[in-house]
Image (cartoon, helix red, strand yellow):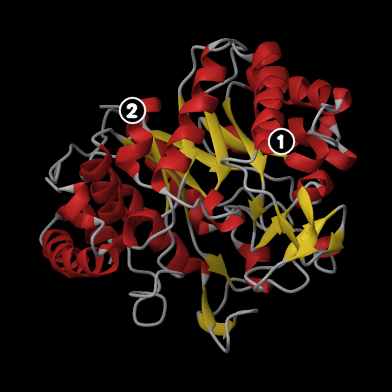
Amino acid sequence: MTFTLGVNYWPRKKAMYWWKAFDRAEVASEFAEIAALKLQVARIFLFWEDFQPSPEKINPQALIDLGVVLDTAQAIGIKVMPTFFTGHMSGANWWPSWALLDREQEVFVRRCISDGKETTRAGRDPYTDPLMLDAELRLVKAVCGRYGEHPAIYSWNFSNEPDIFYQPKSFQDSARWNALLTKEVRKYSTRPTSAGIHQPAVAEYTGFRPDYLAPANDYLSMHGYSIFYPGTAISDPLNSNLIPFTNLVTEALGGKPVLFEEFGYSSSEHGDVSVFKPKPFSNGGKVFVASDVDGGRYYQEVLEKLALCGSLGAFGWDFSDYDPSLWGLPPLDLYEHERFFGLTRYDGTVKPSGLAMRAFAERIEAGELPRRVFGPLTLDPDHWYTNPEKHFAQLFAEWNQRLNNYTMNSSAFLGAK
């Protein structure tokens, strides 16, 4: 068994504005930091409006800059996972202006930004709209046709939590979309593909199902955050069992191995306290921000348990806390907790979460990867999706106790207590 460690990457001083102000020296410096943490993969995001300014046009400079990123990664010794159609990112939906309709959203669902401005216009359906599908295939062709076999490519990823950007009208729509994109990638690249789905896809209705995606993909990607899941967000926000349990469920429903492509926590700015803070656009909701000590322990436990549950690997969210110069710009102006998810701080120092990732990498290098002891589970997808909220919550209650019992009696966890 192998276990791949990686991180989701935006530059600490650029965030979502990276491609508009690309700097190769910045990438080289920060990729070197990633390599120093002994992480193998950087997941990056092809910001849609920057790569495709119109349905028919691909930005040639963005393609050149992507090549610089890949060449830099190769020189430093890490791999890259490009994510298409971004899309949803850090609490906001970023729409290319050409993908918006000439009508308002019927109901406000989420903050939307286009060309740097807030918008309330409705967007086109990316899964069925002919203009959108043609544009998506054009972008895949341009990127994969040029870099499909680049030595630095780890895999290709379709969108980031795409149901938040636009919820498919049916499971069939999302499955056809995923299969269509994979077929296009296959013309130019032998590298794996996956869709960037998240934990709600197995705990509620989102328009995505792992068993519908699995036939087209090499493995399944999954994201999860105990600080956001309703069953833990308030009562136990650093519950380290939710992520490995979600991995088990996704594997069982889809019948393929799972890479945990995103997990993490938001820290307090200076990492000195664990508190709840107001969460924007949530009707008075709160989000937990953790101390660095608590966050480091959380990372340590999640990594151990993911290995015990047979995961392909784990990518932390994300590389760095964002520089204060970005705090006045969307989305960080309102979503304060999004500023502080990093494995490193905005001054470049490494948090305990980053140290936990490096320590786990060193264990893997030493041949000390924990062997799988849990799963695989056996689940009926059709039955599961008759009431995914209920089934997820009930089974999690059982597995939460089971994993707690195991860790209480395992020497591997004594240092984390």
Q: Label 1 crowding class (10 Å Cα cut-off): few <14, some 14-19, many 20+?
A: some
Q: Residue, x 43% and y 49% (percent of image)?
A: 170
State the residue in front, 378 or 262.
378
- In this rendered view, identify the residue nearer to me: 3 or 103: 103
Check contact, mark 2 vs mark 1: CB within 8 A: no
The image position of residue 210, as x and y in percent, is 34, 42
Res 329 → quadrant: bottom right
- Indicate the position of residue 1 as horizontal and vertical percent values: 25, 27
Taking the image as shown, residue 374 lies to the left or right of residue 214, namely: left
Residue occupying the point 71% across, 23% down: 138
Mark 2 → mark 1, Cα distance in angstroms: 25 Å
Q: Nearer the viewer, mark 2 or mark 1?
A: 1
Q: For label 2, count other residues whose C-alpha is less than 10 Å away and answer few (under 14), some (14-19) or many (20+).
A: some
The residue tagged 2 is 215
Three-letter residue code for mark 2: Pro
Q: Determine the residue positioned at 83% across, 31% down.
A: 25
- Residue 185 position, x and y percent, is 56, 19
Q: Amino acid at mark 1?
A: Leu
184 relative to 300 in the view: left or right = right
**Residue wearing tag 1:** 131
